[in-house]
Amino acid sequence: MSHSPDDGQHQPYRSEGPYQQQPYPPRPPQGPGYGQQPPYGEPHPYGEPQPYGEPPYGEPHGPRRRRSRVRRWVIAGASVLALAGVASLVMAHYEIPPFTDKGQAVSFGTPGSGSKGAGGTDDKPPANSKMSMPTGPAADFKNSMTLPDGTHVAVTTLDGKKSGFKGKVWVWAPKEYNDPKYAKSGFPVMIALPGGAGYPSNYWMGTDLGLQSSIGKWYTEGKSKPFILAMPVLNPGPDDKGIYWDGSDIPDQPKMGTWLTDDVPDLMRANFRTVKSRDGWAYMGSSTGGFASLKAVLKHPEKFKAAICSGPDIVPDSSLWKGHDKEKAENNPELLAKELIDKKGPDVYLAFQVGTNESNKNTLPNVQKFIAAYGKGPIHTELKVIQGGQHNAKTYVPNMGEGPIQFISKVMEGPVE
């Protein structure tokens, strides 16, 4: 690269190329009378005329050199800052502290009735309160991601006391949970179940699906309750050759039904201010998670009030049920619905949504048949048909806000005191 003579890069004593500048004559001896400047404009006895104000003969051109050094330092500093910025982005992408807060401890409030919780209150709720203070023990929550509004999706490993199964649960609380206005309020809980393998993660906690931010948005729009989300793994192992556990206690298998309907709710009660009654407890899920959500509410209507079931199976169909027909029947939503109708309650609310381009073409007809046969008495149903919708969460999440979330929110409670 070439430089103009006054761009700050000019070197007065050498130049690149085969022709080198000749050096000035040797510096004259020092002593009395030597080294003094001649009158302005007159020839110097040992070199060229020196304009007024320039350095003495043979000395470097100070101001220009200083400008050159300053410019080089500025360029070097800018380069270092640019590299640091790129490095920080890379380290944040690969979640290397301190450029990410992933893995840091997250507290949703100190468990225990009468202890200072996330809302900052030391008061015990009155005996007739609709809310339940966190009972403890406190879980070890680690941050999985931070949302733009400052809320956290946190994860813990839950050792299920009733099921005997140990697995991950992700949780999220809306920003209202820490609002002093709701310091004495219990919040509704939605247990969100994935489809597919559902192990070793629960895809609802991913940023691209936006379930958490959607709940917050729908609440501000008056469409939804400010649900606390619990997002547990659905299966105890990978989906190997189509094997799954139907969210049920299949004999000789991990008790995933007990895990989802007892251990996970117990975790939420231990760590959050919740609603005492079933009016604050709901499920949602897609595909096999939709089946598990439907079955959980129909099997335990005294504990859970509502479910959003997206592209669900209607009957248990895991290959692990082979040889266990009695237990399979006890986990069949059709038979559970008939039993609930015969007992005349309690009332449950089931919001279905199905795409017209589901991978299984029987999904929509099967849901329609279920609603026609069992959508009566204490079983209240709604169906949203998504035109062009496919069998995936990216179809289901946006459409939840256009019907299903309102349907269940109208009959649920929270925040309550």
Image (cartoon, rainbow, N blue to C red):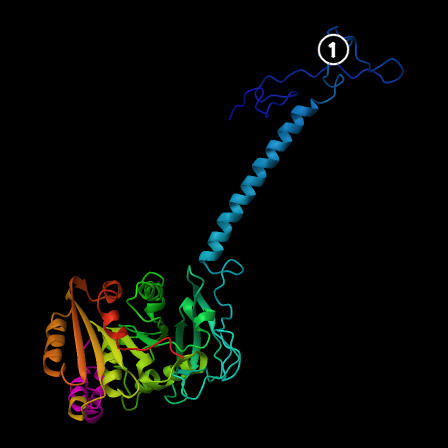
Q: Can you say whether 255 is above or below 46 in the image? A: below
**Place of residue 189 in the rendered image (x, y in percent of width and height, measured from the top left):** 35, 77
Q: Between 150 and 188, which is closer to the camera in this rendering?
A: 188
Residue found at x 47% / y 52%: 89
Residue 254 magenta-drawn?
no
Q: Quadrant of residue 348?
A: bottom left
Amino acid type, callout 1: Gly
Q: Can you say whether 169 is above or below 88 in the image? A: below
- Locate residue 120 relative to residue 267 in the image: left or right: right
**Place of residue 277 in the rendered image (x, y in percent of width and height, measured from the top left):** 34, 85
**Place of residue 358 in the rendered image (x, y in percent of width and height, measured from the top left):** 16, 67
**Total label count?**
1
Label 1 residue SS: loop
Which residue has dot 1 on it? 47
Residue found at x 40% / y 68%: 174
Q: Residue furthest top?
A: 42
Instruction: Magenta stretch: give its range.
Output: 312-339
**Place of residue 378 in the rendered image (x, y in percent of width and height, measured from the top left):** 18, 85
Residue 329 magenta-drawn?
yes
Q: Can you say whether 47 is above or below 13 in the image? A: above
Q: Quadrant of residue 173?
A: bottom left
